[in-house]
Image (cartoon, grey):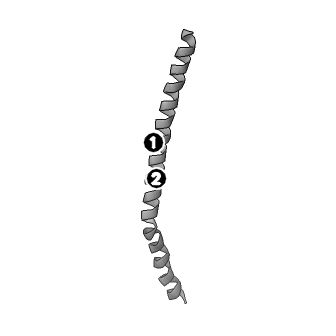
């Protein structure tokens, strides 16, 4: 009976290996989204600064 449990353990260990591609894809997607958020934040900050400068000039 113990040998049956030992046989199951390698199968459980090999399962995350298959999911490694999905994890890598998820990580890449997260990095891409983070980059998009930083870019959007930068654009919005620049726009706010321009609006403040225009309102101060009036």
Tell me the quadrant of the picture where the N terminus can be found. bottom right
Callout 1 crowding tier (Cα within 10 Å): few <14, some 14–19, many ≥20: few
- Where is residue 30 drawn, in percent x and y? 48, 50
C-beta proximity under 8 Å, tags 2 and 1: no
Q: Which residue is mark 2?
A: 29
- Where is residue 15 drawn, in percent x and y? 47, 73
- Where is residue 18 drawn, in percent x and y? 43, 70
| Residue 25 position (above or below residue 58) | below
**Residue visible at 53% across and 83% down in the picture:** 5
Outermost bottom residue: 1
Checking the image for residue 25, the label placed there is: none
Q: Which residue is mark 1?
A: 35
Who is closer to the viewer here, 13 or 41?
41
Task: Compare marks 2 and 1 and give the one earlier in the sequence.
Answer: 2
Who is closer to the viewer here, 13 or 53?
53
| Residue 42 position (above or below residue 11) | above
Tell me the quadrant of the picture where the C terminus can be found. top right
| Residue 49 position (above or below residue 31) | above
Who is closer to the viewer here, 19 or 36?
36
- Secondary element type, mark 1: helix
**Residue visible at 43% across and 64% down in the picture:** 20
Outermost top residue: 58
**Residue visible at 51% across and 34% down in the picture:** 41
- Secondary element type, mark 2: helix
**Residue visible at 55% across and 18% down in the picture:** 52
| Residue 13 position (above or below residue 51) | below
- Where is residue 54 drawn, in percent x and y? 53, 15
């Amino acid at each position: 009976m113990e040998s049956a449990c030992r046989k199951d353990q390698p199968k459980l260990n090999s399962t995350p290996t298959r999911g490694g591609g999905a994890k890598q894809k998820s990580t890449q997607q997260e990095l891409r989204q983070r980059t998009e958020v930083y870019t959007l934040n930068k654009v919005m900050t620049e726009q706010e600064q321009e609006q403040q400068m225009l309102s101060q000039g009036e």
